[in-house]
Amino acid sequence: MSAKTCIFITGSNGLLGQKLVYALKNDPEVQLVATSRGPNRLAVQEGYTYCSLDITNRQQVVEVLEKYKPDVVMHTAAMTNVDQCETEREACRMQNVEAVRHLVEAIDGMHQKRVHLIHLSTDFIFDGEAGPYREEDAPNPVSFYGWSKYDAERIITASGIDWAILRTIIVYGITDNMSRSNIVLWAREALRKGQPMNVVNDQFRSPTLAEDLAQGCILAAKQRARGIFHISGPDTLSIIDLVGAVARVNGLSMDCVEAVSSATLNQPAKRPPRTGFIIDKARRVLGYAPHTFEAGIRLVQEQADAFERANPKP
């Protein structure tokens, strides 16, 4: 990658977006532009340019890309609440499909340079009947969220732009303001409080540390990699075993946890029962080297403890 490559991030207020900003803002080879809807919510606001952007507004997307003329666009912004996507389908379609169309068309129209799009996708494009999955396995979503992400993939793969699609699974980690939770933080907090928890024992995933996913994005950008890559943690386990690992690492009791089947939850959106990824291609081609789930939990525990020491509750 040549000096001062302009990298443009969407969704920089989100978990992955924050990790990307912090990983790239001091990179001497990178000119970093972070964008998200509304104000910048990162604690550190130096070392990069921030611009508010509504990715569902085609004109805004075109104008902002023309202004900054990036070499790489990392598209992390999305509507990811699976049940909300099922019940608010138009909002899901606008954020997960039309926004991608806007980006692809804007990039395609930038004839003065070849822009590389790195797009984040999901294991939920699969039906979960035959996981763990390789990149070439056939998608068959079982939820509107899954279909929206698959539709976005098809827009990208049918385009004439340079692209890499990075599919991932259950991203966990610490954000600056700690206002948004994820499964590891939720489990840690509920276990500490001894809150009753119903946890499914018939869904299997490969949880992904946010720092690892950010590293996968950066590896793809610096190598200008093309194609589809599965970027997740190396361990596939049931959701209840995932919670059990959080309890074990944090020295907490599982007495408050009750194992249940997915059918008892009556969620609006269906979930694929068993996904998980085979990440051999990412390891081989990109040099991707993720933490084990236990090592990832320990890192999150250290970060959360440090945050709590720095921000004591009254």
Image (tube, grey):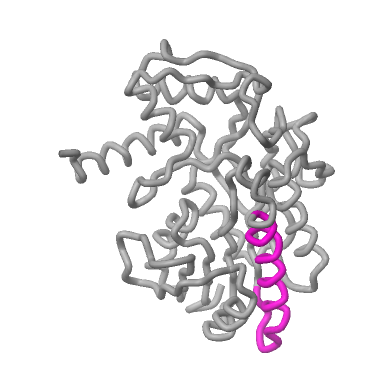
Observer-nearest residue: 228 or 262? 262
Observer-nearest residue: 309 or 2? 309
Locate the N terminus by quadrant. bottom right
Examine the rendered structure and indicate whether residue 284 appears above or below residue 20. Answer: above
Q: Residue at x 54, y 21 (%)?
A: 199
313 within the magenta span = no
Examine the rendered structure and indicate whether residue 146 appears above or below residue 276. Answer: below
Asked whether residue 165 appears in the rendered view, the answer is: no
Observer-nearest residue: 253 or 52? 52
Observer-nearest residue: 135 or 121? 121
Residue 3 picture location, percent across and down: 49, 78
Q: Which residues are magenta?
A: 92-115
Residue 81 picture location, percent across and down: 58, 44
The image quadrant that residue 189 belongs to is: top left
Residue 293 as seen in the image, left or right of residue 179: right
Asked whether residue 234 appears in the rendered view, the answer is: yes
Characterize the magenta stretch by its predominant secondary structure: helix
Q: Residue at x 33, y 23 (%)?
A: 192
Q: Residue at x 72, y 76 (%)?
A: 105
93 within the magenta span = yes
Residue 304 picture location, percent across and down: 32, 39
Residue 151 as seen in the image, left or right of residue 90: right
Residue 22 as seen in the image, left or right of residue 199: left
Examine the rendered structure and indicate whether residue 107 appears above or below residue 250. Answer: below
